[in-house]
């Protein structure tokens, strides 16, 4: 094809910069290893590479644009977004990436409170790349156990089990993709929020994130109400999405052969939904399944806040791996903390119950409850077992799955009902579908007890504990999550 004569020198420079980037070269040089791992077809590999190339090129164009300004403002970024024909949200997300790469600074002007973007390092080639294998996350004990690093690894060299991750160094091609999508490497919370609220403006952060509507709801589907733990809303959503053929698969947590040890589960139909019922408190890396050949076109993922963050982050930074692209619905559940499987066994032992004799576990009113198949429920105050929870969860600020399309949990609703936070247009359509097609009954959250106030109180407490923990370990650890 004839090369256009008016190709801009800057655009060519940006393209060359992408080609020089360590991550990009690794992915090109390792094409054979990647194809041999069987996760990508050749066409999918090229799709992925070209999308990454476009993303990186846009990022370097932004860098060069900022280099030519002494101090850039949001107005300048708007000008850039117009010139390059991209949404301002996209440009803001790339500016945060440049910040994490230590190339620019983003600060609030003390007088105007407006954000300012300044170049920090003019020669990006000399700046150490931040993209490394997630071994640093595992070693620093800050891993949430979400599983997306395993889910994105193009050569399948990460294994996560029971919250512990291992990388096969022989196979690793050091592409850093795992680090890029990890919610515990860097996480631009402000950017996640503007994507959730579909706005271009930063807002003051609420303790339960951005949401459009808040309800208390309960399933009307008979087969769900017989087995569900609270209101059965996550299962009802999956039923509805399967019935209306909006999905042909979903990812959630099932029970492994080891009793009360969860395992990631690919849900292929409504019958499979039963296998996910009941809350499990042991850590489970659902998103690791994204690394398998999944014979579905449209997926829903049911998972914890850290999983929702990982999925939204992948979406914002446009990682078009074959399976991440298929995720159309993020259904988040509330999560206070999770436990290693051994801790679950310890709690069960302290309550003198046989693990095989448990029909349900629950956290309610500050207590961990175990319901035996025979006999009365037993409980232990949460404060007595907090030391058994995963240390890694202490870095978690998010109670309510703030990065989901729709979030569900028991806090705030009466027994037998679930609190539902509708966050995005996608979430709104789901809730409307559930109501219109008679899958659920519902009330405004403000009309029930204990209601929104309790949810806000507990969410605030989780965020405060997280901030205190991060401040405490800041001086001791080489790696802590970069959240802001
Ligand atoms: S472990 Fe991470 S850096 Fe290594 S190949 Fe997999 S994704 Fe790339
Ligand atoms: S937080 Fe998730 S992506 Fe990051 S290392 Fe842990 S399992 Fe992997
Ligand atoms: S507390 Fe946070 S990090 Fe831990 S499992 Fe729940 S969402 Fe993930």
Image: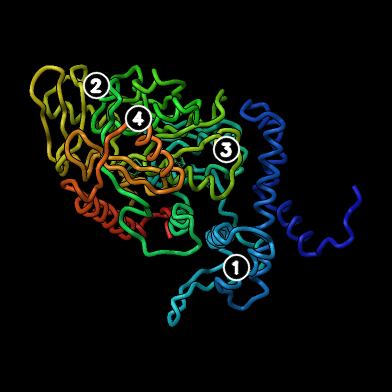
Q: Helix or strand or loop: what does disc 2 sit on? A: loop
Q: Is residue 379 left or right of residue 235?
A: left
Q: How crowded is mark 3: few (under 14 residues within 10 Å), some or many (20 or more)?
A: some
Query: Is there CB contact under 8 Å for labels 2 and 1?
Result: no
Query: Is there CB contact under 8 Å for labels 4 and 3?
Result: no
Report how far apart the C-alphas of labels 4 and 1 lie in the structure. 42 Å
Work out whether residue 318 or residue 243 is closer to the camera in this orientation and state it. Answer: 243
- Answer above or below: position of 191 versus 133: below
Report how far apart the C-alphas of labels 2 and 1 lie in the structure. 53 Å
The residue carrying mark 1 is: 78
Work out whether residue 147 or residue 169 is closer to the camera in this orientation and state it. Answer: 147
The residue carrying mark 3 is: 325
* Observer able to see residue 138: no
Report how far apart the C-alphas of labels 3 and 2 lie in the structure. 34 Å
Q: How crowded is mark 4: few (under 14 residues within 10 Å), some or many (20 or more)?
A: many
- Answer above or below: position of 224 versus 417: above
Quadrant containing ligand 2 reads top left
Q: Helix or strand or loop: what does disc 3 sit on? A: helix
Which mark's residue is nearer the viewer, 3 or 2?
A: 2
**Residue 236, numbered circle:** 4
Q: Where is residue 387 in the image (x, y as percent from the top left)?
A: 22, 42
The answer to which of marks 4 and 2 sits earlier in the sequence is 2
Question: Seen from this angle, which residue lies furthest front?
Answer: 436
Q: In this view, does 299 lie to the left or right of 261?
A: right
Question: Seen from this angle, which residue lies furthest right?
Answer: 2
Report how far apart the C-alphas of labels 3 and 1 lie in the structure. 28 Å
The answer to which of marks 2 and 1 sits earlier in the sequence is 1
* Observer able to see residue 321: yes
Q: Where is residue 175 in the image (x, y as percent from the top left)?
A: 61, 43
């Amino acid at each position: 094809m004839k090369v256009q004569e008016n190709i801009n020198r800057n655009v060519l420079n940006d393209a060359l910069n992408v080609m020089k980037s360590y991550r990009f070269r690794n992915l090109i040089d390792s094409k054979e290893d990647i194809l041999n791992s069987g996760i990508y077809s050749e066409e999918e590999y090229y799709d992925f590479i070209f999308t990454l190339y476009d993303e990186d090129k846009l990022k370097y164009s932004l860098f060069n644009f900022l280099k030519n300004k002494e101090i850039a403002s949001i107005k300048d970024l708007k000008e850039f977004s117009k010139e390059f024909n991209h949404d301002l949200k996209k440009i803001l997300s790339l500016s945060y990436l440049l910040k994490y790469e230590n190339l620019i600074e983003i600060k609030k002007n003390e007088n105007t409170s407006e954000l300012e973007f300044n170049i920090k390092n003019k020669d990006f080639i000399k700046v150490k790349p931040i993209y490394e294998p997630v071994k640093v996350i595992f070693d620093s004990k800050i891993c949430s156990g979400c599983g997306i690093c395993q889910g994105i690894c193009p050569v399948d060299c990460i294994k996560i089990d029971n919250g512990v991750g291992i990388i096969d160094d022989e196979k690793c091609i050091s592409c850093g993709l795992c680090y890029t999508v990890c919610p515990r490497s860097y996480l631009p919370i402000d950017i996640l929020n503007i994507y959730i609220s579909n706005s271009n403006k930063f807002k003051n952060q609420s303790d339960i994130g951005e949401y459009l509507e808040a309800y208390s709801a309960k399933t009307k589907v008979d087969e769900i109400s017989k087995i569900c733990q609270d209101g059965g809303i996550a299962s009802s959503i999956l039923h509805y999405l399967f019935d209306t053929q909006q999905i042909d698969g979903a990812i959630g947590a099932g029970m492994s052969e080891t009793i009360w040890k969860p395992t990631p589960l690919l849900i292929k139909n409504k019958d499979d939904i039963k296998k996910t019922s009941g809350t499990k408190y042991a850590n489970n890396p659902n998103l690791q399944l994204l690394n398998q050949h999944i014979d579905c076109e449209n997926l829903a993922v049911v998972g914890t806040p850290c999983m929702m963050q990982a999925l939204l982050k992948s979406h914002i930074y446009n990682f078009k791996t074959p399976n991440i692209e298929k995720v159309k619905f993020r259904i988040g559940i509330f999560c206070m903390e999770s436990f290693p499987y051994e801790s679950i066994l310890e709690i069960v032992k302290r309550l003198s119950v046989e693990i095989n004799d448990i029909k349900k576990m629950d956290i309610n009113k500050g207590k961990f409850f175990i319901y035996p198949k025979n006999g009365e429920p037993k409980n232990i105050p949460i404060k007595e077992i907090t030391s058994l929870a995963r240390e890694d969860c202490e870095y978690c600020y998010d109670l309510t799955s703030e990065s989901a399309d729709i979030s569900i949990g028991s806090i705030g609703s009466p027994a037998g009902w679930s609190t539902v936070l509708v966050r995005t247009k996608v979430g709104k359509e789901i809730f409307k579908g559930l109501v219109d097609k008679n899958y659920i009954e519902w009330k405004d959250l403000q009309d029930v007890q204990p209601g929104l106030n309790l949810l806000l109180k507990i969410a605030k407490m989780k965020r405060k504990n997280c901030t205190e923990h991060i401040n405490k370990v800041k001086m001791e650890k080489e790696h802590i999550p970069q959240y802001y």
